[in-house]
Amino acid sequence: MGPTSKANPSFLFSWVDAPSPNILSNSQKHCVLAPFSESRAIARYVLRKYKKNEVDLLREGDLKEAAMVDVWTEVDAHTYNPAISPIVYECLINPLMRGLPTNQTVVDESLEKLKKVLEVYEARLSKHDYLAGDFVSFADLNHFPYTFYFMATPHAALFDSYPHVKAWWERIMARPAVKKLAAQMVPKKP
C-alpha cells in the first residue's frame, strides 16, 4: 500500500495504489477499493466465487472436512511458513534479489524449527495422503510457494528424512495445475 492508502478494517477493504489505465479511468485518486490484502483470504474468496461442484478445495460440503482444511491452513500460516520462509529468504531472495549474504544463523535456527514442524506433518501424513484427509485441499496447496522455493535451496534434502512428507510433496508436484504453475516459477540458484 502506498502513500495514498486508507483502510477500512471493519469491511476487510483497503485502498491500494492501482496505476492500471482501466482502473484509473474509474478513479480520480488513482486508487481502487480492493476487498482483501491477505493472500489466503483472497484465495478463499476466489475459490468460493468460482466454485464448481467437482472442485471444492475448501471442502465446504462437509463440515468436518472443512474444519480440517481450516486447521491445516492455520498450521501453514502460523507454524510452517514462519519456519520455512526465513530459509527461502536467506538462501534465495536475499542473495539473488537484494545482493545480501546469507545469514547462516537465521538459516540454522529456522531449520531446527522446520524439523519440529515436519515431525508433526510426518505423523499426520503417515495416516492420510494429504493434510486435511485423503483429498487434496486448499491447505495442501497453500504450502506450494514456499516449499517450491525451499526445494531450490541447499537444504532441500531435509525432506528425505520425512518419507511421508516427501511423498505428499511429490503428490502435490504431480498435479497438472501445479506443474503448469511451477514451470513459470523456476528459481535461479545462487
Image (cartoon, rainbow, N blue to C red):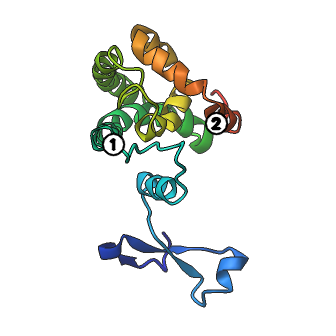
- Look at 38% across and 37% down and name the residue there: 81
In terms of depth relative to the viewer, which is nearer, 68 or 1? 68
Q: Secondary structure at mark 1?
A: loop
Q: Is residue 7 above or below residue 41?
A: below
* Image coords of residue 24 (percent x, y): 66, 82
Residue 151 falls in image quadrant = top right
Q: Which residue is mark 1?
A: 62
Q: CA distance from mark 2 to mark 1?
A: 24 Å
- Look at 36% across and 23% down and name the residue there: 111
* Image coords of residue 183 (percent x, y): 70, 33
The circle on residue 177 is 2
Q: Amino acid at mark 2?
A: Ala
Marker count (numbered): 2
The quadrant of the image that shows the C terminus is top right
- Residue 73 as seen in the image, left or right of residue 37: left
Circles 2 and 1: CB atoms closer than 8 Å: no
